[in-house]
Amino acid sequence: MGTNQLNHFDEQGNAVMVDVTDKAETERCAVARGSIYVTREIFDAIAGGTVRKGDVLGTARLAGILAAKQTPHLIPLCHPLLLSKASVDFELHEDTLCVDAVCTVKLRGQTGVEMEALTGVSVALLTIYDMCKALSKTMEIGGIHLERKSGGKSGNYTREEENV
């Protein structure tokens, strides 16, 4: 099968889980990023730790880590993986009233962790929305993307902003 062909389908076009039995174990890492744009009231409440439901970023961090670990239960053809690291960090941008979430996932294994990083960042952002929606529903989640990955047969990847 060529490198530009989809490999989640068999010869009959049926969806299948990719067989990684013969792939070598390598160190793999993926970093995904996404953003949630909020109102001034929500931004100040998150930054000040005054959201009534509790610690928004702490809860979102745990939700993102848990989501990365549970990815094969959400995405049908993902392999169950023994992750060696899953972390979620946040960057608050007061000038744009935006919170960026960054999820980093690592392992030594036979398949990549891009989906785990993307799932982690998505659920972290959804958790921020859930915890803040009582203040205002005027929030927008977007820009979820893979920033970089390393390891595996396809090698390293870094997103180039000018090509997006």
Image: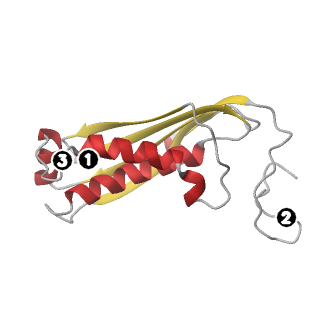
Report the residue marked by disc 1.
98
Q: Amino acid at mark 1?
A: Cys
* In front of the other: 38 or 75: 75
Numbered label attached to residue 10: 2
Q: Residues within 10 Å of mark 3 (few under 14, many from 20)?
A: few
Label 2 environment density (alpha carbons within 10 Å; few <14, some 14–19, many ≥20)? few
Tell me which label, 1 or 2, sits earlier in the chain.
2
Which-is-in-front pick, marks 1 and 2?
2
Q: Position of residue 145 (x, y in %)?
A: 49, 48
Q: Relative to 69, is 78 above or below?
A: below
Within-10-Å neighbours for mark 1: few <14, some 14–19, many 20+: many
Towards the viewer: 85 or 162: 85
Closer to the chain start, of discs 1 and 3, is 3
Q: Determine the CA span between mark 1 and mark 2.
A: 42 Å
Work out whether residue 43 or residue 52 is closer to the camera in this orientation and state it. Answer: 52
Element marked by disc 1: strand
Whole-number angstrom distance, CA of label 1 to CA of label 3: 19 Å
Residue labelled with disc 3: 54
Question: In the image, what residue occupies the spot 87% across and 72% down?
Answer: 12
Q: Secondary structure at mark 2?
A: loop
Position above or below: 116 against 108: below
Q: Which label sits on residue 43?
A: none
- Residue 72 lies, with reference to residue 62, above or below; the image says below
Residue pictured at 12% horizontal, 47% vertical: 45
Q: Amino acid at mark 2?
A: Asp
